[in-house]
Amino acid sequence: MARRRRANGPLDTELAELPPELRWREWMARVEAVIFAAPGPVERDVLARVVGRDCSLELVIEDIRDALRDRPYELVPVAGGWQLRTRPRHAESIHAAFGSAPAPVPLSQTEMLVLASIAYHQPVTRGELSNMIGKQVSRDTIGYLRSLGFVAAGPRSPQPGAPYTYVTTKGFLAHFGLDTLRDLPDMEALEDAGLLSKDKLLAKDMPLALMTGEGDEEGLDGDDGTADEPYDLDDGSGGKG
């Protein structure tokens, strides 16, 4: 059995008294316990606090994922960390047990366009966003995306007046089940699927559609997108809860 933490003493991370196999199992158990207890993705530097200096966290994660292969949940890389999530194929059972699906995040078409434009072109100013989607992007739209935790202020732009730029957050990555921005769908693939007009976007013209299906140019006439039909965003996978 692993040596317990002494009262008011540091956690024994090296576990030198244990045989190698038991030491490895204890490290695996600690890492899994920390990830299970965390409310969001857990980064590597946090996990490193509970294992020995010579422990390969990459191999520990690999062994945990292998051990969970037949379980209804899995260990996945999210937002630069690791998180336990139920497998998508069990979503119907979970929804049936609790009576309804978790409330999705509603976004209008304009808000979705702004969010996608920030994701692909960050850091980007509000003026640049307005040019990209062909209409004025209001402060309310940016404020709403910030309130959801999807967007944050980035560095000041070198443009006259030094306006703020905007970038996506780890909350954005976590919500959409992405580890890094490199996991975003390729723009050419979206264009081939009819979800994005790359030429129009790069020419600062209006995209035909982005991430949500066919576009609706009439829904882009307002200043803050309030006339748009809302889209419900749900990445289809659940956390450990």
Image (cartoon, grey):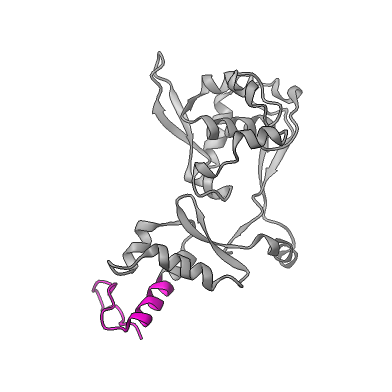
- Would you place residue 42 above or below residue 173 in this image? below
Measuring from the top left, give residue 160's x and y in whole percent. 40, 13
Residue at the limit of the structure toward the top, as seen here: 160
Residue 219 place in picture, x, y as percent = 73, 25
Residue 226 position, x and y percent, is 69, 29
Q: Please tell me which residue is depicted at 52% across the width and 19% down the height of the picture.
A: 127
Question: The magenta stretch spans which residues?
Answer: 1-30
Residue 234 lies left or right of residue 40; in this view the side is: right
Q: Residue at x 51, y 46 (%)?
A: 171
**Quarter of the picture holding the N terminus:** bottom left
Against 104, residue 110 (above or below) is: above
Say which residue appears at 57% left-offset and 65% top-offset.
Answer: 74
Residue 44 lies left or right of residue 196; in this view the side is left
Q: Quadrant of residue 14?
A: bottom left
For the question of whether residue 172 can be seen, the reply is: no
Front-most of 22 and 4? 22
